[in-house]
Image: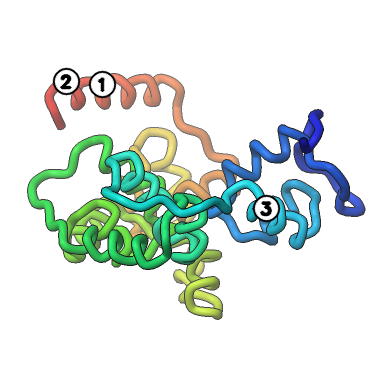
Amino acid sequence: MHGSGGGGQTSGTPRRGRWSQAEIGRLRELYGLRDDPVIARELNRPVASVRKMAAEIFDSKPRTGPWTATEVERLKKYLGCSSTEVIARILGREVDEVRTQIEELGRIQLNGRWTRDEVARFKRIYGTRTDENLARIFGRPLESIRREAQKLMLAKDKAFLRKLNGKTSTRMPRWSESELQQLRELYPERPNLEIAEILKRSVKSIVSKAHNLGLKKDPERLRQMGRENVSLRYKGG
């Protein structure tokens, strides 16, 4: 129906005409997680073409009835990244049903220690979701979300804050020469979270500045940290 062939990002005049299977597959992956103009740039397609194809792929007669566990997990995947209308389109549900399900997620209040899988997912998506949506995604009180973020020295992505607030986010203080020197001394041997706690900055900030400075972890220390992480898993830490 749409032809076949390679997709992928190119430059120059946006492509028009039939979509390749690779392009359609990539659109399925990205739609709902990134803004339409961002997807259009990656696929080198006009924004209107992206929206038209998304409507063709996802628009269908909405389903009704009880939500499956898989549907709820898919809702969590897109929650906070897209409008309710877009999420409804992707899930094949009525908008009101999606809103109701989001409200239900807000009633779940788990307590206790975070699991390793929860922490890994939390680190991955924290920068691009509001704390309120994170509370719904993880089924935890808002205070638990903020406490865990502080513990892990996480920060929201600047692009996300600009989109959320419609203006540039609050900037962290510029790095002083003494801080840079500390980073150079600590980075090869210390875990990023520990460095973040020492320098009172987010882990993301530590990683970004280290990359800009061309800093690397000591290979033997990396192996040691890997062994420590494995040990913690077996201990249930």
Number of numbered tags placed on the structure image = 3
Whether residues under marks 3 and 2 lie with C-beta atoms below 8 angstroms apart, the answer is no
Marks 2 and 1 sit apart, C-alpha to C-alpha, by 6 Å
**Mark 3, other Cα within 10 Å: few <14 / some 14–19 / many ≥20:** many
Q: Residue at x 34, y 66 (%)?
A: 99
Rendered residue at 34%/37% (across/down): 190
Q: Which mark is residue 234?
A: 2
Q: CA distance from mark 3 to mark 2?
A: 41 Å
Front label number (3 vs 2)? 3
Question: If you read the primary sequence from the N terminus, does the residue marked by circle 3 or circle 2 appear first?
Answer: 3
Q: Give the SS element for disc 1.
A: helix
Q: Looking at the image, tell me whether mark 3 or mark 1 is earlier in sequence order.
A: 3
**Between 196 and 111, the one nearer to me in the picture:** 111
Q: Disc 1 marks which amino acid?
A: Val
Residue 12 horizontal/vertical position (percent): 90, 51
- Along the line of sight, the residue nearer the viewer: 94 or 48: 94
| Res. 182 visible in picture | no
Report whether 37 appears left or right of 153. Answer: right
